[in-house]
Amino acid sequence: MDRYKCMICGYIYDPKFGDPDNGISPGTSFQNLPDTWVCPQCGAPKEQFEQI
């Protein structure tokens, strides 16, 4: 699965780890994140992420 980087703060979403602090289980692809999910570090919306 592809990783995605926040273009605002540099946070990298890695599906292998998910975002358990925000209810996202490991193994959740970026495409399957809810539309309401935001960067856990800076609050940027998904549109601010770029595939790396």
Image: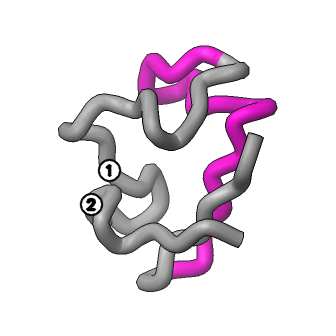
- Between the residue at mark 1 and the residue at mark 2, the CA separation in whole angstroms equals 5 Å
Q: Which is more N-terminal, label 2 or label 1?
A: 1
Q: Main secondary structure of the magenta part?
A: loop
Tell me which corner region of the image, top left, top right, bottom left or bottom right, holds residue 12. bottom right
Q: Is residue 17 left or right of residue 32?
A: right
Q: Mark 2 = which residue? A: 45
Q: Nearer the viewer, residue 42 or 15?
A: 15
| Circle 1 Cα neighbour tier, 10 Å, few/some/many (<14 / 14–19 / ≥20) | some
Magenta region: which residues? Answer: 9-25
Give the amino acid at mark 2: Pro
Give the amino acid at mark 1: Val
Secondary structure found at label 2: loop
Provide residue 15's location: percent of width, then percent of height.
Answer: 69, 36
* Residue at (52, 42) in percent of width and height: 30
Q: Nearer the viewer, residue 21 or 7?
A: 7
Q: Are marks 1 and 2 in contact (CB under 8 Å)?
A: yes
Residue 48, numbered label: none
Q: Mark 1 = which residue? A: 38
